[in-house]
């Protein structure tokens, strides 16, 4: 018996494949940017530079919120990342309870 011929791909399937490739690259770029900005916040905390850590935190929170809005990141993931980074920066501040 001869082998079956490969099924033809519809135009819409070919277009969806193209769109997926473009979106994957764009989303990966945005996720990479968020990771880089997060590392900058961690570096500033390690260097004990409060003002620059807070400035870096504002940038990364903005980027994370935009990614969550566009559904590049899940909203719970975005919230968790923001919370952890905020807690890290706030750990530099002197405790007011003392």
Image (cartoon, grey):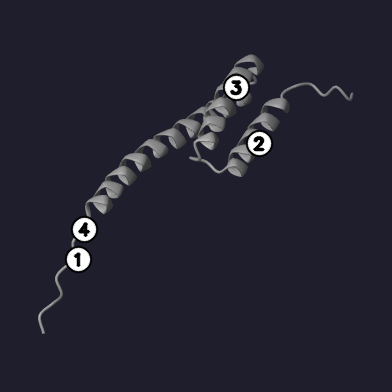
Say whether disc 3 or disc 4 marks the residue closer to the N-terminus. Answer: 4
Q: Please give the residue where the numbered disc 4 appears in the rendered image.
A: 9
Quarter of the image with the C terminus is top right
Count neighbours of disc 1 (C-alpha within 10 A) and say few if under 14, some if 14 to 19, many if 20 or more: few
* View extreme (right): residue: 98
Cα distance in 3D space between marks 2 and 3? 13 Å
In depth, the one of 93 and 85 nearer the eye is 85
Element type at marker 3? helix
Q: Nearer the viewer, mark 4 or mark 2?
A: 4
Q: Which residue is mark 1?
A: 7
- The Cα atoms of the two marked residues, 3 and 4, are separated by 46 Å
Q: Quadrant of residue 9?
A: bottom left
Q: Are marks 1 and 4 in contact (CB under 8 Å)?
A: yes
What numbered label is drawn on residue 85?
Answer: none
Image coordinates of residue 62 in percent, x first then y, are 56, 25
Judging by the rendered image, the residue that carries numbered circle 3 is 58
Mark 2, other Cα within 10 Å: few <14 / some 14–19 / many ≥20: few
Q: Residue at x 40, y 39 (%)?
A: 28
């Amino acid at each position: 018996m001869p082998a079956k011929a490969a099924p033809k791909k519809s135009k819409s399937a070919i277009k969806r494949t193209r769109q997926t490739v473009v979106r994957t690259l764009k989303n990966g770029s945005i996720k990479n940017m968020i990771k880089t900005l997060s590392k900058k916040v961690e570096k500033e905390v390690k260097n004990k530079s409060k003002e620059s850590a807070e400035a870096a935190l504002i940038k990364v929170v903005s980027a994370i919120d935009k990614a969550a809005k566009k559904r590049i990141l899940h909203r719970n993931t975005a919230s968790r990342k923001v919370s952890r980074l905020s807690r890290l920066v706030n750990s530099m501040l002197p405790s007011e309870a003392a």
